Amino acid sequence: MNFLQPWMLLALPLAAIPIIIHLVNQRRFQTVPWAAMRFLLDATKMSSGYTKLRQWLILAMRTLALAALILFTARPLTSGLLALLGGDANRVAIVLLDRSPSMAEIPTGALNSKLEQGIDQLAETFKTLGIQRIVQIDPLAEKPEEFPSVTQWLRAAPRDAWSATSDIPGQLEKALLYAKNNPSGNTMVWLCSDMRDSDWKSQDGRWKGVQDGFRALGPSIRFSILDLSQNDLNPTAANRSIRTTEVRRVEAETGPELALSLRIEQAGASFPAQGTAGNNSGDKSVDKTTENTTNIPVEITVGSNRSVVEVPMQGNSAQLTDYRIPLEKDFTSDANAGSTKTDSAARGFGSVRIPSDSNPSDDTAYFVFEPAPARRALLISETPELVQAIELCASISPEQSVRCEAELASLSQFESTDLSDVALIVWQENLPTGKSLETLSKFVASGGQLLLLPPENPDQSEAFGVQWSSWEALDASEAPVGNAAAPVNNSESTDNLEGNAGNAQAGSDRIARIAQWQNDSQLLSNTLNGAPLPIGQLGIRRLCGLTGNLEPLATLPSGKPFLASVTLSAEQALPIMLCATTPSDRDSTLAGDGVVLYVTIQRLLAIGASRVGTTRNALAGTDHRAVDASSKMSLGNDEAPSNEYPMHAGVYATDETLVAIHRDETEDLPRVVETPVLERLFGDLAWAKISASKKASSLVQEVWRWFVVAMLMALLLEALLCLPKVNKKRPSQA
């Protein structure tokens, strides 16, 4: 139990007054033996047990009444945060709001979103506790904003969710800085979140610094986590989300067309069927999976034109691949001549939308398009035969409307090469230093793709936080065992994978197979039809050691990285890729198998080519340089303030560039932070997690009324026990 006025508990010893009076009264009289009373005492022995019990009950009721009176005046509270609330009503409340897309979800039976419910419940709690000083941590603001009253904070609190993931450790760092600069006797940090791991970033290295910083401030700072993850949807109100997977402007025989691919995902149980899809005419038998197929109407908007297409969903996902939409015909291009006329019809933007459901933040996705820019690759190597397969993959276009070029250059020629139209640099040399390192860093920062391959004779140079060691041939421990090759973090079935094809010859040829790979990464993801890349079929004969702060994307059975990525900074939009071998037949079967090498090279080229054109794609909140307050919104949330444009999905025009801001893909992962993880993140700091209710009510409640009732009941029972015993008159004898 906790109290708003705990100093009143100092009066609790007064509850012992009836006991003291009872003991004093027993000492007031002296017992004098009297012979005549002996017979009376013997006569009343039978009723003495009841008399003593009544006296003890009277004493207990008097004590209980006094204790209830004292507790009532101390204003007791009850809630899930009883262990945290102190007695200082003038404490400071630092509020951290999770504004990620999942917070826009409206739970079943509720009228408001999770974010709105959390704000309302915090406001009622602050009023109950008498808190007047509230500090709001805004990730986009230069400094926290203070409010002198709950009413003013409630009026200014943001109630719309962003399209970007939240950065809980980053907000806590700002709260720590504020607490250091503004010390207070009693500070409560309130975190309002639905506990998604994508927002809490439980593996982030900043958590240790946050924990150490608050620990240094002492026990005066406490944490209260308002958990909104319990407001889950019931099976009849599962949430669907949509996003575009590929948007291309192509030249067809009838004129320019837009090739659109999209994906719809469903969380929770299935929706009630809205109809069946597919034409089974001519089929001898109907597939049982079509019985549960649901048609999802998707509204596609391109400029001022709108159309609706039915996308069949089986299970929890649906895909629309290479859907063609005719565009205006007043744009002409000559791909063979390499010249392109740019006008208002050459590029454009649009959106795809599904019917509204419990979470409106993921019902719309945006896109921009333009004529495909040339995909130019630059290969830096003193041994061209080692990268000949990559040069070939980079020069073969995946479709007629895309022009691909590959150029081989030496290290001495690199510094004089113009990189303005280069999409991908393949670096098969010792790690860059000096001016070359500076040039590559700027290239990556501008959106270009960089693939690092090991040189023939690695030196001790270090760049981008990584370092090559020495080459090593396949060891016996790397030989494949059973069906070890398998993708990880994959929701698709991999039963048809031939991950260990060629195991029989592995022992004699000493070829290692890939044991695991991250096919939820952009580079190694499944194809548009859902089939996984045959990465398990790749064979590795030689591997170059790789050390540093990197993230393995594909590993051998021993855990040694075959393919990895490294990110220079949080502002860097795209990571640097590293492959620990070469496509040479002496080192691997990358060139012989071909499929994986070609797909990954073309994916790198497609990503890097976006820096060349006049359209951009960026994740909300991660690339603040792509959009700012001076940008003009073409599509999106009209109510979004201009300073929050980078955090809202939509299409923005900035100078001569069209930028599409997308919802972060990690928001589609339902993984939440459980209590054991919170214990690790907060360590020995004082914290508690409170489960929010669906109603906008206070998280704490005063329960003094129950103590008043207890006091009155105690006094009433005491009065009844003090009533004299009624003697029944004997009937008179005739």
Image (tube, rainbow, N blue to C red):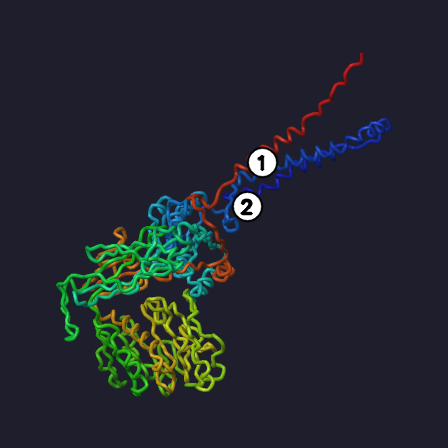
Q: Residue furthest top?
A: 734
Residue position marked by numbered label 2 in the rendering: 1
Instruction: Name the element at disc 1.
Output: helix
Q: Name the spot of residue 450 as percent of width and height, x first.
A: 31, 76
Q: Which mark is residue 163?
A: none
| Secondary structure of residue under mark 2 | loop
Pinpoint residue 642: horizontal percent, then vertical percent: 25, 55
**Is residue 538 positioned above or below 62 on the image?**
below
Q: Are marks 1 and 2 in contact (CB under 8 Å)?
A: no
Q: Badge 2: few (under 14), some or many (20 or more) residues near its Cα, within 10 Å? A: few
Q: Nearer the viewer, residue 458 or 449?
A: 449
State whether residue 72 appears in this view. Answer: yes
Q: Earlier in the sequence, mark 1 or mark 2?
A: 2
Label 1 is placed on what type of residue? Ala
Q: Relative to 255, is 499 above or below?
A: below
Q: Residue furthest right?
A: 35
Judge from the rendering whether residue 693 lies leftward or rightward of residue 336; answer left or right.
right
Amino acid type at mark 2: Met
Left or right: where 172 falls relative to 620: right
Asked where in the image residue 335 lies, by quadrant, the reply is: bottom left
Front one among 393 and 130:
393
Q: Which residue is mark 1?
A: 710
- Residue 420 in view of the camera: no
Q: Nearer the viewer, residue 456 or 323?
A: 323
Q: Quick one: quadrant of the C terminus?
A: top right
Measure how far apart labels 1 and 2 are at the Cα level: 16 Å
The residue shown at (46%, 46%) is 699
The image position of residue 378, as x and y in percent, is: 26, 79
Image location (x, y in percent) of residue 54: 70, 32
